[in-house]
Image (cartoon, helix red, strand yellow):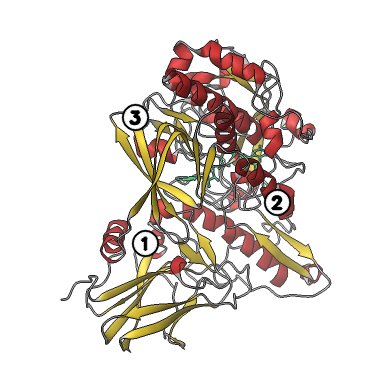
Amino acid sequence: MTTINSSNSIMQLATRFDNLGGWTVEQQFVLQMGSSYLLAHGIGTPITEDPTTKVKVEKAGKYTLWVRTKNWTAFWSEGKTPGIFQVKIDGVADEAEFGIGCQGATRAERAAWYWQKGGVYELAAGEHEIALHDVMGLDGRCDAILLTTADQEPGNTLEDYKKLRAELLPAPVVEKGHYDFVVVGAGISGMCAALAAARLGCKVALVQDRYILGGNNSSEVRVGLGGQINIDPYPALGYLLNEIGPDRIGNARGAHHYQDDKKMNVILAEKNITLFTGYTVTEVEKDGDKIKAVTAVEATKQDKIRISGDLFSDCTGDAHLAAMAGAECRMGREAQAEFGEKLAPKEADGFTMGVSIEWYCEDWNTPCSFPDSLDWGLELDEYTVEPVHRANWYWEVGMRDDQVADAEKIRDYGMYVAYSTFSYCKNRYSKKEDWECTHLTWVSHVSGKRESRRVVGDFILREQDLTRPIIHEDSTCTTTWRIDQHYPDPRNADKYPGEEWMSIGVLTPIDFYPLPYRCFYSKDIPNMFMAGRNISVSHIALGSTRVMRTCGLIGEVVGMAASICAKRNVTPRDIYTTYFEDLKELMRKGTGRTDVPYTQFYHQVDRTGHQAEDR
Ligand SMILES: Cc1cc2nc3c(=O)[nH]c(=O)nc-3n(C[C@H](O)[C@H](O)[C@H](O)COP(=O)(O)OP(=O)(O)OC[C@H]3O[C@@H](n4cnc5c(N)ncnc54)[C@H](O)[C@@H]3O)c2cc1C
């Protein structure tokens, strides 16, 4: 058997095609499946602009075509997936339909990423064209094309794949400099951390895996900001968030509601911030317990960079940086006995609040069709279907899955539910004539996450800190949202046990509560902060602290603390033990501008969490 190597094989990454056509670059699962890939996110309309590329064949020969892909609906259905596509070599479509899934005893095996074999091609030396052709407009996906004269079959494990990439596409790492403070993740928390530190004199690197800033509040996810800012005991905190926060509210609205440009412009105006968009941090280098540098991979070209720093902040929401650095993290629910939390379950488990895939449809004057999902979709009937025009927070999936390992499956289930619902309304609903002119115009392919890993700090905030409340000497910014816990909607759980897709919110009132600074740095990694939903809180306490205005305040405090660490050459913990007065002084001043319009006006829900994340 001849083995695959660089002298007999060509690997072409889909995201590196010369022309990406109408397909979407998908990088959310780089850490799980090893690559960015191209996604045919046509929302039910086949994408007509094919991605195309030229590949150079050095030696003429008989090349076998392999395509790395997956069957994304195989977790829930044995029916023929709508995620199929063709591969064309020099304009001729291979006989295979790609994306149909591999053989396997379990659904997870059949839904795994795998190399699907195509035909054998007699290729002359010189340039040849490869194209991908979408068939259904329903999220077919292609990571890479392999052309090989070897008879070895490429292996399907992540380890096999990484080895193959290293052999066929070695990636040099480009050095991008040293910074006082490296912030990983540019959701609301990361942006505020970077801005505050930069304004207080730090040289900051802000690394964001997507090309758009704002995380859940971006036009990619479309979640409105919740919680309040400019609250005692440090009312100056929050003007910073006001500078980047949209002046509109609501979930799953038009893209313009989320004012991506406003956020980007504020970051770009900050001369001390070097922004790296489209870069996912995938590796960490350590010096003893400290983080020394991170390596990040770009979403489209998939080139690698290295950024070193004195201080780091994990603002990834999922605590990816912390986990890579070996910091203790938690995921799931603590048992009641651990902290004495009344709202906690008797036994600890892996249950988390889930992911929402937001979507909406619009009524136009023109009729349209949508593929019937009968073969591959969720089983729905007149009683289980939710015939609505817009998803909201309670379209929530993946509460029983692993939010990190199963991230792609969770995202896919959110899309699966959305397409199946719309398809039912268009094709089978008793009132389907009302849906004749309804167009499914937007389905997010970016997961709206609420909870995954939480990094353990010197203090873990608990339910009773918020409800009694217990004020600590290292009080900082204030959490204002009620403890808002989500559970599967019992009616939905009855019909879809273990695979629920609707939730309910259960609210427990709290007084406004200043968060202890010790929740904002890792107990294990001496130079790492965290801000956002991955701070050191219990599952129950996260029910309050996760809303984005609160995350922004935490980011602002972390940026301030980083500036003190840089100035005094001390660690985040030293601020608590020795320099807390310095932090208090900065918190009294704030880092935001007060000469720009104040746009963060509150509604009932911001004050009370009245309808759990709703508007
Ligand atoms: C449907 C829904 C409704 C909600 N309702 C509300 C609400 O009404 N109000 C409210 O305030 N909150 C609400 N929340 C909760 C809130 O949106 C989240 O808790 C929020 O994400 C917290 O912000 P964050 O900055 O910690 O994380 P995120 O917003 O997730 O930002 C983290 C960023 O880091 C990036 N990143 C991740 N890993 C890496 C990496 N390895 N390298 C580089 N970058 C990385 C991510 O792409 C992301 O952009 C809701 C959430 C959902 C899903």
Q: Residue furthest front?
A: 271
Residue 252's disc is: 2
Answer yes or no: do the residues labelled 3 and 2 have beta carbons within 8 Å? no
Q: Mark 1: which secondary structure? A: helix
The amino acid beneath tag 2 is Ala
In the rendered image, the quadrant that contains the N terminus is bottom left
* Count of picture labels: 3
Q: What is the distance, in whole Å, between disc 1 and disc 3 at their CAs?
A: 38 Å
For disc 1, the marked residue is: 109
Mark 3 or 2: the one toward you:
3
Q: Foreground residue, 498 or 567? A: 567
Whether the residue carrying mark 2 lies under 8 Å from ligand 1 is answered with no
- Of the numbered discs 1 and 3, the one sitting upstream in the chain is 1
Residue 290's disc is: 3
The amino acid beneath tag 1 is Glu
Q: What is the distance, in whole Å, between disc 3 and disc 2 at their CAs?
A: 40 Å
Residue at image location 48% in from the left, 56% down from the top: 27
Answer yes or no: do the residues labelled 2 and 1 have beta carbons within 8 Å? no
- Of the numbered discs 3 and 2, the one sitting upstream in the chain is 2
Q: What is the distance, in whole Å, between disc 2 and disc 1 at their CAs?
A: 33 Å
Mark 2 or 1: the one toward you:
2
Above or below, comparing residue 563 to residue 387 in the picture: above
In the rendered image, the quadrant that contains the C terminus is top right
Tell me residue 126's x, y (percent): 34, 85
Residue 613's disc is: none
Q: Foreground residue, 205 or 316? A: 205
Q: Mark 2: which secondary structure? A: loop
- Of the numbered discs 2 and 1, the one sitting upstream in the chain is 1
Q: Foreground residue, 147 or 490? A: 147
